[in-house]
Image (cartoon, rainbow, N blue to C red):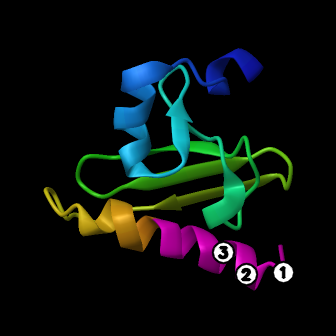
Amino acid sequence: MKAMVRNRLAGKPLEDFRACGKVGYGLGVRTLLDASCSRSPVGEYGCDGAAGAYALADRDHHLCVFYAQEILGQIKAYEEIHPRIRDLVYEGLGL
């Protein structure tokens, strides 16, 4: 599992991917590298689907979240909706 979530990007590819947030990319999943703008801990991982699905896994808190909506082509979901859902879950659980 650790190999799957370890960031494998560096340099320009990492800079480009971080445009989506303070994340890197492991083997098929994004992984949180900097928790300064998130309620979830470094190492939280998951994926954001092209049509708006969102999955989060947090091994530290034994927590998984899955959210789905159909909004193909709406970048607002990745920049605003998904981070807000994540933070509301952590806030609601007192984490």
Mark 2–mark 3 Cα distance, whole angstroms, equals 5 Å
Q: Earlier in the sequence, mark 1 or mark 3?
A: 3
Q: Is residue 83 left or right of residue 48?
A: right
> SS at mark 3?
helix
Q: Amino acid at mark 3?
A: Val
User: Which residues make up the magenta segment?
Assistant: 83-95
- Total marks shown come to 3
Which of the labelled discs sits on residue 33, or is there none? none
- In the displayed structure, would residue 44 be above or below residue 81? above
Q: Position of residue 44 (x, y in %)?
A: 68, 46
Quadrant of the image for the C terminus? bottom right
Secondary element type, mark 1: loop
Question: Which residue appears at 83% of the width and 52% of the height?
Answer: 62
Are the residues flagged by discs 2 and 1 in contact, CB closer than 8 Å?
yes
The structure residue drawn at horizontal position 47% and vertical position 25%, both measured from the top left corner, is: 28
Q: Quadrant of the N terminus?
A: top right
Can you identify the residue that label 2 sits on? 91
Residue at the location (66% across, 48% down)?
34
Q: The residue under label 1 is which amino acid type?
A: Gly
- Tell me: 25 left or right of 76: right
Disc 2 marks a residue whose amino acid type is Glu
According to the picture, the residue beneath numbered tag 3 turns out to be: 89
Q: Is residue 80 above or below residue 14?
A: below
Q: Are marks 2 and 3 in contact (CB under 8 Å)?
A: yes
Is residue 44 positioned above or below 94 on the image?
Answer: above
| Label 2 crowd (10 A; few <14 / some 14-19 / many >=20) | few
Residue 92 position in % (x across, y down): 73, 84
Alpha carbon of mark 2 to alpha carbon of mark 1: how far?
Answer: 5 Å
Q: Nearer the viewer, residue 7 or 56?
A: 7
Classed neighbour count for the residue bearing mark 3: other residues with Cα under 10 Å, few (<14), some (14–19), many (≥20):
some
**Circle 1 is placed at which residue position?**
94
